[in-house]
Amino acid sequence: MKSYTYKITLEEKSEADADAKVDAMAVLVKKLDASELTKLAHIVKNDPVKTALAKQYLGV
């Protein structure tokens, strides 16, 4: 498998918040394939009810 490098910019309240997001994204990228990530992004972007349910389940 090839490796690809990307540069992203996050606008957050603190560097710690940005680091936490990048760490979380890295886990998702490692554990989910492209189609799963695409479906997750679609749900988060377009289905506020499912997103709210997921947040409630996660306790956030």
Image (cartoon, grey):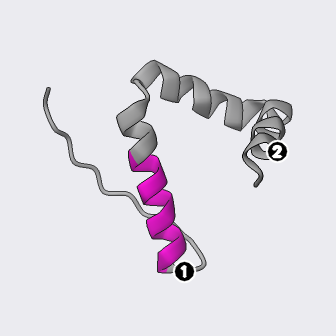
The magenta stretch is 15-26
Q: Secondary structure at mark 2?
A: helix
Identify the amino acid type marked 2: Gln
Q: CA distance from mark 1 to mark 2?
A: 25 Å
Q: Are marks 1 and 2 in contact (CB under 8 Å)?
A: no
Q: Which residue is mark 2?
A: 56
Label whose residue precedes the other's in the sequence (1 or 2): 1
Identify the residue shown where x is 35% and y is 37%.
30
Asked which quadrant contains residue 57, the reply is: top right
- Seen from the viewer's position, the closer of residues 23 and 15 is 23
Residue 22's disc is none
Q: Which residue is mark 1?
A: 14
Q: Residue shown at 57%/72% (left/top)?
A: 12
Q: Is residue 3 left or right of residue 24?
A: left
User: Whole-percent x and y of residue 55?
Assistant: 76, 45
Whole-percent x, y for residue 58 in the image: 72, 46
Compared to 8, does 11 lie above or below?
A: below
Q: Main secondary structure of the magenta part?
A: helix
Magenta-colored stretch includes residue 43 = no
